[in-house]
Amino acid sequence: MAKKKSAKKSMSSGGSRPGVSARAAVKQARNGPKVVARKSPVHGRGMFALVDIAKGARIIEYKGRKITWAQADRWYADDDTKPSHTFLFTLDDRYVLDGNKGGNSARWINHSCKPNCESDIVDGRIWIEALRNIKAGEELYYDYNITLEDPHTPAEKRRWPCLCGNKGCRGTLLAKKR
């Protein structure tokens, strides 16, 4: 948000920022951030729309270090006695993006059983897109649909609790297994 403000300020004062053309500064101010991370009433931090976002719009790229599942298993040992929490986003059967390393604010998007966003993987990049029109001020959510190799037992479902509170909430971040 500070970048957007300073771009407008330098524009209105007739100044320019070093290394940025006036045209680029105008474009940055006009196409500034669509979302911001802040405290969420649902869980920890969340992502909120700063502007109205149209259905189908690409909102933000989920960024992080590309690592193998083997690396993820080594770095983030699972503890059955604690609730699970992760910024790992599955790319495919071999790789995940680790939002803890080189990640951006997209990692703060919370889960909901009634999401207003979805992820789309294109050429190894993860994009968050709007499933419906989203109003400025609204929190962004997508369905994590986490699938474990092990059965989704009642104990596992409790380790991955959903806090969305929506009507029809399945009570867990875990996907329904077929």
Image (tube, rainbow, N blue to C red):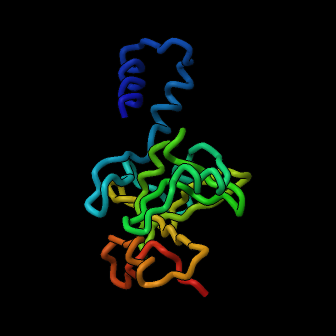
> Looking at the image, can residue 133 be seen?
no
Residue 31 versus residue 143: which sits nearer the camera? 143
Residue at x-position 41% and y-position 52%: 108
View extreme (bottom): residue: 178
Q: Is residue 96 above or below residue 114?
A: above
Q: Please name the residue shown 34% across and 71% down the image.
A: 164
Is 124 on the left-hand or right-hand side of 28? Answer: right
Residue located at (57% from left, 61% from top): 119
Q: Position of residue 56 (x, y in %)?
A: 56, 62
Question: Along the line of sight, which residue is nearer the eye, 166 or 19?
Answer: 166
The quarter of the picture where the N terminus appears is top left
Residue at the farthest left position: 41
127 on left or right of 158: right
User: Is 132 situated above or below 10?
Assistant: below
Name the image quarter holding residue 102: top right
> Residue 20, position in %: x, y?
55, 18
- Compared to 42, does 20 lie above or below? above
